[in-house]
Amino acid sequence: MLERPSQLNSSQRFELEQVRFNSISFGIYLPTRIITNEEIEKWMVQTPNGRLITADEIKKRIGVERRYQANPSQSALDLGIQASVATQNLEEIEAVITSTSYPLGVNVSAEISISLQIKPDKKMDIHAACSGFVRGLTYMKENESEFNGKKVLFVATELYSHTLEDLRDDGIKRDPSMAQTIFSDGAVAIVFRFGQDLKVLAYKNEKIPEEYDHLIQMPIDRNLMTEPYIEEPVPSECSTFQQNGPKVYEEMRTRIPDLNKNLIEESGLEPSDIKLVIPHQASGRMIDAIASRMPEYKIYKDIRDGNFSSASIPKAMIRAIKEGQIETGDKILLSGFGAGMYASSAIVELG
C-alpha cells in the first residue's frame, strides 16, 4: 500500500509505504523534498579545476539521480516513528532495535516505544554509521537466547543532510567528495520474529585497521549517546561530514568482497546457495567494484535515490522483494560497511 498525503504543512511532503513478505512487515518513510541532479546542476558548482558539475556527471559518477532531504524541523526520531507506523504491525512488540548514525540526546528505541505506546522487554540503539543495520542483526545473533522467537521492531533511521557541506556555499572546497550529492534522509522499519521470519545463519564483524579510520569523519557528539546503546566508534573531530572518497573506494572495493567470500566459506555454504548479495548502497561505482570481485554472485543495486547510510540495505531489501527477486527460504548476504572504519556482513534466511 502506498500513501501519498499531499501535505503535512505548506513545505513538508512525504512518502509512506508498507510492504509485506510473509509474516515480515516493512515500513518506509521518505521525507520532504526531492533534490534532483538537474537542480544541483543549476547551482553552477565548479570543481577545483573550474569545470561545472552537470546532472549527467553526477549520475555517471555515483549513480544517484535524486536524494531526499528532511524538513529542518524533523529529526531522525521523527522519521523512525513514521516508518514504524507504516509497518501497520505494532501489536505485541517484544524488542525494539534502532540504528542511527547521529545520537539525539535520547535513547531512540525507548522514545519510539513511548511514541508508539508499546512496551518491549528489550530496547537497544546501534550507532555504527553505514554498518548499523547489519550490526544490529549480528547483535541479536550474538544474544540469540534473548531474541529468539521474539517479535522485533527494527528501525534504521538516518538524517545526514544537516551535517553535509553545502555545495552552494563553496562546500566542494571543504569536501571534494561532494557528499551532498550522495546522501539521502529516510527511515525503514521492519517487524519480524527473530529466528523464525528472519534467521541469521552466519555473520562476521570486522574493525578495519586504525590507519584507515580518518578516511571518514562525522560530527558525532558522543555525549548525546544514551543507554542502552552499542557504538562502533567513528572519528568525529570535525564540524561537518568529511570523507576521502577515492581512498575509501580503494580500500573497500577489495576488503568487502574478501570479507564476504570468507564468510560464505566459513558458513559451509556454497556460492550457489546465496540468492542475492545486498551491499551497503554507498555509490554505484562502489557497488560495481564489489560486483566485479564477486562475479559468481548476483549483486543488488538500489542507488537511484541516494545513500541512506544504515537504512540503505533494508530499503534495497524492500525493492528486491517488490521485484520478486527474494522468495521464501532464500539466503541473502547483507553487507554493511563504512565509517569507523567498520564492516558487518550477515547471511540471513527469510521465511
Image (cartoon, rainbow, N blue to C red):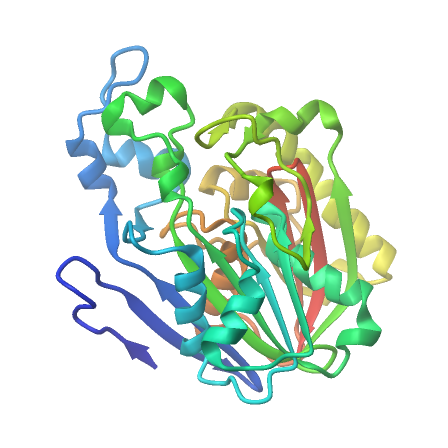
Q: Examine the image and state in which quarter residue 149 appears.
A: bottom right
Q: Is residue 218 left or right of residue 271?
A: left
Count of number-bearing discs:
0
Q: Position of residue 72 (x, y in %)?
A: 28, 49
> Most extreme residue toward the left, as rendered?
10
Q: Residue at x 45, y 65 (%)?
A: 80
**Extreme-top residue of the structure:** 49
Question: Which residue is pictured at 17% across the width and 68% down the height?
Answer: 7
Q: Residue furthest bottom?
A: 91
User: Does the image show residue 324?
Assistant: no
Does residue 203 appear in the picture of this structure? yes
- Which residue shows up at 57% across the image and 66% down it? 109
Which of the 4 image quarters holds residue 248?
top right
Q: Is residue 252 left or right of residue 258?
A: left
In the rendering, at what x and y percent does residue 20 appear?
48, 82
User: Is 88 situated above or below 220?
Assistant: below
Is 193 placed above or below 126 here?
below
Name the spot of residue 338 as percent of width and height, x first.
Answer: 60, 40
Q: Nearer the viewer, residue 300 or 156?
A: 156
Q: Quadrant of the C terminus?
A: bottom right
Question: In the image shown, does 137 or 164 lie closer to the viewer?
Answer: 164
Quarter of the image where one finds residue 93: bottom right
Counting from the top left corner in percent of width and height, residue 113 is at 54, 74
* Of the pair 14 and 45, the residue shown nearer to us: 14
Is the N terminus in the top left, top right, bottom left or bottom right quadrant? bottom left
Up the image or down, 318 lies above or below 220; here it is below
Residue for point 29% across, 54% down: 73
In the image, 237: left or right of 213?
Answer: left
